[in-house]
Amino acid sequence: MKKRANSYIGIDIDKLTNSIVNTVSGDSFATDILEVTKVDLKKITKKNGWLFSWNNEFKFADRKIYKLTISSNPTIIQGLISIGDYGDHFYLHLIESAPFNVGKRKVYEGVPGNLFAFACKCSWDKGYQGFLAFISKTRLIGHYEKMLSATQVGVKEWLSSLTPHLN
């Protein structure tokens, strides 16, 4: 398998909710998070407006991809997250809102927040106290500190310790 470049998380967390909210009506919708299947990958393509190659991400054995859907409409994927379990924390490799949930005309708010919360819950359930690591795009570090109470830690040392996991 060829070497993988580091991914930098660059998604705005617009709202922290335990559901997603329609930006026009204000209606709130319960969500489910399920593991992505090969069938799902046929819809999740750059041709359909997705930014990342989720087919490539699916090939890595050290991570799992999950989809966020509205409970009453499980066929429409609202967002995706790729996480890996490293024995004492989870690492967030990629996260992306569906193309229709990005920008000023997004349909739903709360997609990224729900996905981050899911990853933290996975960490909590494994006994890792909810620890989740990720590399942020520089311009969003303050945003994650504010919205998620994220803490920047020994980045250079931490990155070098992750090198085997990111290749």
Image (cartoon, grey):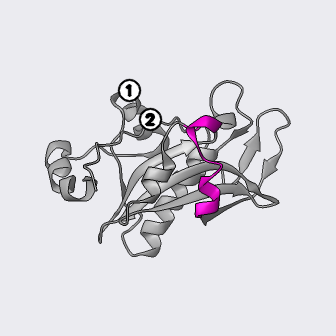
Q: Secondary structure at mark 1?
A: helix
Is 149 positioned to the left or the right of 39 in the image? left
Q: Is residue 37 magenta?
A: yes
Residue furthest out toward the top = 104
68, 2: nearer the viewer: 2
Which quarter of the rendering shows the N terminus?
bottom left
| Magenta segment boundaries in residue numbering | 36-50
At label 2, the amino acid type is Gly
Q: Going 52% across and 35% down the picture, which residue do you hit?
A: 12
The answer to whether residue 94 is above or below residue 37 is above
Q: What number is the disc on residue 10?
A: 2
The answer to whether residue 131 is above or below residue 88 is above
Q: What number is the disc on residue 139?
A: 1
Circle 1/circle 2 CB separation < 8 Å? yes
Q: Earlier along the polypeptide chain: callout 1 or callout 2?
A: 2
Q: Secondary structure at mark 2?
A: loop
